[in-house]
Structures are given as C-alpha cells and as structure tokens.
Image: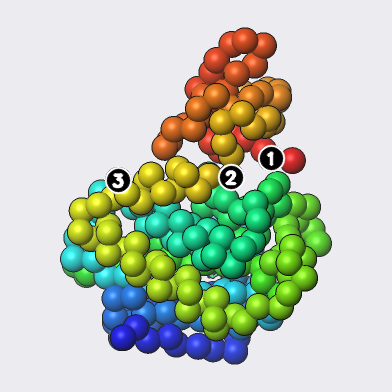
Amino acid sequence: MNEVYSYDEVTSTNDLAKKMVDILKNGDIVWALSQTAGKGKGERHWHSPRGGLWFSIVYKPQKLCEDPNIYTKMASVAVIKVLKRLKVKGVGVKWPNDIYCGRKKLGGILTEIFTKAHNHAVIIGIGINVNNKPPEDVKDAISLFEITNVKLSLSQLLNMISSEAQRLYNLITSGKRNVITNLWRNAMVIKKGHKIKVSDFSGKTYDATVVKVLSDSLIVEKDGIKERIHPSEISLS
Ligand code: BTN
C-alpha cells in the first residue's frame, strides 16, 4: 500500500520528497495543503495557496526509462483521465506538461530525476488549482471551482489521480511505453483543425491551423504552406 505523507505547509513537495527519498517507497506521495516555495518549470515560482492540490509522487524504477519525459506524459494522462471521469469538459494537455481547460491553465507537472549514489528516484510534482483562486498575475490561469462551481475533496482527487498514475506507471515498467505516448497524444488539448497562434523561435508571430499532431511536433498550415513546428512555439490565447 502506498503511503501518503501529508503536511499543512511545506516549501515545495518536490524538495521535501528529495529530502525524504531514503524512507519513501515506490509510489509514495508527499502532499501539502500549501507551499511557500512551490516550483514551476523554468525555475518559476508556483503559487500554491490552500485550496489547491499540491503533491509529489515518488517512483523508484529499477532502471530509468531512456526517455524521462514519459513520466511527465504518464502523469498528465492520469490527471486528464480523472478530470474527464469527473465530467470536467474541455480538459487536455498542452505540450509538454501543462493541464489546460480550453485556453486556460488549470495546473502543471514538474518532474525531477533525483540521483543519490547509484540510486535514482523520479519525483513527479503535480499542481492543480482546485478550490483556490488562481493567481491574478497569471493571465490564463483557472481553477476547477471556477469551471464547475463545485468544491472538490482534495484527498479524493489525490486518491483518484495517484491510483490512475500507478496503473499507468505499471504500463511503463512492463514495457508498454507506446500505450502512454498514444494516450498522451490523444489527451492533447490541441487537435487537428484547431486555430492556434504560433510564436516561432525567430520571433515571428502568426495564426495557423493544425493539420497533424505528432508526438514531438505539430504540422500547421498557413496560407496553404505546411510547416512543422515545435509545440513550445504555440500560444493558445
Ligand atoms: C508548471 O506548470 O510550471 C509545473 C508546476 C508544478 C507545480 C507542482 S505543485 C507540487 C509540486 N511541488 C512543486 O514545488 N512543484 C510541483
């Protein structure tokens, strides 16, 4: 049985999980009601007040997957599956690790690989705006409460997501990574036919239509010309 270590307030559940790594078993969880130094991708601060769901799942695979992104993909699929089960409409993954509802960001995932001596642990930090007010300075953030008008039980949501993650994680360890990749591709918020804004690496911005979603890139069309772009070049709003 996986253990859930729960706290009222921590700096960051990912950082605490690293400190606790020796006592944590595969699949154990570190959960906090609030974080004072929550971390987002790119070293950004992650606003984590009470009311949101902030936790880290720790896995200790015998052998790390050669594509560590698979762990993030697996966790985002687990979150989307649970939100869909809860009948939240319009949820999907925005490449690579953002959980979106329509064009608004509901949460994110920060995976860190922690290595100590010859041991390693995969720490998957998951943050979802649930009953809290999303940060005002993030223009496209939204919470589940704002979408559904219903307050959800954080422990129930944690339970549902971690069980789903464990099920999907077992697929990775049993060599079925392609199942995760396919589920992740299908969970993308951006689908064929969507109109998107592209801000490409050269600084050019233009509107385009998605023609094909691949696992590592997108084919878009603008003025009849098809182009392959990196998913990080997309903006939804
Ligand atoms: C992102 O979209 O930038 C990723 C955000 C990840 C936030 C979660 S909250 C729980 C865990 N602990 C952290 O410090 N960060 C992750």
Q: Along the horizontal axis of the image, is 68 left or right of 103?
A: left
Q: Residue at x 37, y 86 (%)?
A: 3
- Local packing at callout 1 (Cα closer than 10 Å; few below 14, some 14-19, many 20+) is some
* Circles 3 and 2: CB atoms closer than 8 Å: no
* Circles 1 and 3: CB atoms closer than 8 Å: no
SS label for mark 1? loop
Work out whether 196 lies above or below 36.
above
Which label sits on residue 236? Answer: 1
In the image, 19 versus 97, the foreground residue is: 97
SS label for mark 2? loop
Give the Cα distance between marks 2 and 1. 10 Å
Quadrant of the rendered image holding ligand 1? bottom right
Q: Residue at x 77, y 66 (%)?
A: 146
Residue 128 seen in this snapshot: yes
- Local packing at callout 2 (Cα closer than 10 Å; few below 14, some 14-19, many 20+) is many
Q: Earlier in the sequence, mark 2 or mark 1?
A: 2
Q: Along the horizontal axis of the image, is 205 left or right of 215?
A: right
Query: Which residue is the site of mark 2?
Result: 189
Q: At which x and y percent is residue 223? A: 67, 11
Quadrant (top left/top right/bottom left/bottom right) for the C terminus = top right
In the image, 179 versus 128, the foreground residue is: 179
Give the Cα distance between marks 1 and 3. 27 Å
Q: Along the horizontal axis of the image, is 161 left or right of 98?
A: left
Q: Residue at x 55, y 50 (%)?
A: 93
Query: Which residue is the site of mark 3?
Result: 178
Q: Residue furthest top?
A: 224
Identify the amino acid type marked 2. Answer: Val
SS label for mark 3? helix
Identify the amino acid type marked 1. Answer: Leu
Q: How many numbered markers are drawn?
A: 3
